[in-house]
Amino acid sequence: MKARIYHNPKCSKSRTTKTLLESEGIKLDVIEYMKTPLNAEAIAQLLNKLNLTAADLIRANEAAFKKSGIELTAANEVALIELMAKEPRLIERPIVETDHMARIGRPPEKVLELFR
């Protein structure tokens, strides 16, 4: 089975997840989302596959989120998705996606659920 990993090579969890999948023989399309940011539609599709809300996916402790002035508990989905599209570092990572599902690699072994 082929999968996509939304990868940030500067993130240790992302590197570990990528290495784990490669060691399992899983072919990956690697998308370095910091270089090629996702648009709002792609983020919404990922949220659907993850079965999460935007608030679940956003890294609220990042400086870019705090600078946005958005209050997580009061924000709507559209505003948070648009913010993640504008500031990709706010997207929790790594995300591994197949045609029908996705998982966040925290811990990295969690993504193996996609292949069992």
Image (cartoon, rainbow, N blue to C red):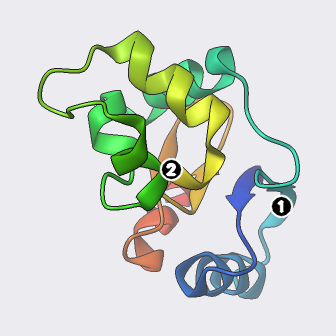
Of residue 80 and residue 100, the one placed in the foreground of this image is 80
Q: Quadrant of residue 52?
A: top left
Q: Earlier in the sequence, mark 2 or mark 1?
A: 1
In the displayed structure, does residue 56 sit left or right of residue 68?
left
Where is residue 46 drawn, in percent x and y?
55, 30
| Neighbours of disc 1 within 10 Å: few (<14), some (14-19), many (20+) | some
32 relative to 17, above or below: above
12 relative to 34, above or below: below
Q: Quickly name the residue at label 2.
A: 90
- Which label number is shown at residue 28? 1
Label 1 element class: strand
76 relative to 93, above or below: above
Q: Looking at the picture, which amino acid does disc 2 mark?
A: Leu
| Neighbours of disc 2 within 10 Å: few (<14), some (14-19), many (20+) | many
Q: Looking at the picture, which amino acid does disc 1 mark?
A: Leu
Q: Quadrant of residue 96?
A: bottom right
- Residue at left 65%, top 32%? 86
Note whether residue 35 is visible.
Answer: yes
Of residue 2 and residue 106, the one placed in the foreground of this image is 106
Where is residue 37 drawn, in percent x and y?
78, 40
Mark pair 2, 1: CA separation: 23 Å
- Residue at left 52%, top 29%? 83
Note whether residue 52 is visible.
Answer: no
Label 2 element class: helix
Q: Quadrant of residue 34?
A: bottom right
Where is residue 15 drawn, in percent x and y?
67, 83
In the displayed structure, does residue 101 sit left or right of residue 42?
left
